[in-house]
Amino acid sequence: MTALASEGRAVYAVDIRGFGTSLGGAAMEEPPLQNPPFAGVDEAIEDIAAAVDVILERQRASALDLVGFSWGAIAAARYGGDNGDKIGRLALYAPLYAEIDATWLERLAGSLDSVRLPATLGAYRLVTLDGVIRRWDADLPTPNSSAYREDGIPELVFETLSALDPRSSSQRPPGFRCPNGPLADVVRIWQGQPLYDPAKLTMPTLLIRGSEDTTSTHAAAVRLLAEIASTQKQYCVLAPGSHFLCIERNRAKLYEHMNDFFAPIRPNATRA
């Protein structure tokens, strides 16, 4: 956000329900298995739509540029496809698209104590510091994590997110609540089900991912690029970088590509 705002843009981030400062919701307060996965892509679309309308009115703009990361790219692409008049340009970082991925399904099941997916997912799960590190390390091609990230970054990420959940410190070990709706959506993606239609994406679109990203794969990105309707589309691969390139040592390259893509296209254009 700081990098994009440094170019003079108005920059907003949305906490989808269940995340960050939007943690509330009855399903997040009850035991997780009492409710189905909370805050999937359908709910995210409602939240994005509400935020877009507020931002456009506040900025007195006719359209804005939208960025989605990982599961957020699913939601951004779905919203952009259905609301092309409100989206000037679309950037999908570490995008996910329909791709059968048995390896990740097996890895995911193992991380959740071999539960059957997605039938037994509850509304949310607890994410510990160890879970953050293991998830990040699973996407790295080497056990030498320092080649990709500075020391202390996983701890900082965990501390920041935990501070937003008043229950985190009372858990043993400490852990913050994370909605399982996105997880259920990703399972569907890895089972080969598309959750958005790239043929509806007619605005300039950027696909960008780290070269070692095993969650957002090169094969899926190439297929997605081919199916996007826009004639103004591009696909960039940044090396080195994993799925979490945005907070790795090479993150400045990601920021630079985003700023280049979102550079003003008309002298009198109004963008947010």
Image (cartoon, rainbow, N blue to C red):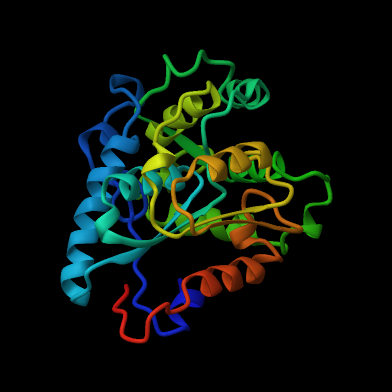
Vertical side of 163 occupied by 259: above or below: below
Residue reaching furthest to the front: 231
Q: How many marks?
A: 0
Near-viewer residue (118 or 259) = 259
Residue 155 left/right relative to 46: right
Seen from the viewer's position, the closer of residues 4 and 235 is 235
Check the picture and name the quadrant holding the C terminus: bottom left
* Residue 39 visible to the viewer: no
Please provide percent x and percent y for residue 130. Answer: 63, 42
Indicate left or right for 225 with 62 as reference: right
Q: Residue at x 32, y 74 (%)?
A: 271
| Residue 215 spot, x, y in % from top left | 62, 39
User: Up-down: is 258 above or below 231?
Assistant: below
Instruction: Give coordinates of residue 77: x percent, y percent.
Output: 40, 46
Horizontal side, residue 259 vs residue 213: left or right? left
**Dividing the picture into quarters, in which one does residue 176 lie?**
top left
Q: Choose top left, top right, bottom left or bottom right for residue 62.
A: bottom left
Residue closest to the eye, 92 or 243: 92
- Location of the N terminus by quadrant is bottom left
Q: Residue at x 64, y 20 (%)?
A: 102
The answer to whether residue 215 is visible is: yes
Residue drawn at 22 percent across, 45 percent down: 46
Q: Nearer the viewer, residue 26 or 45?
A: 45
- Residue 114 location, x and y as percent? 59, 16
Q: Residue at x 68, y 45 (%)?
A: 213
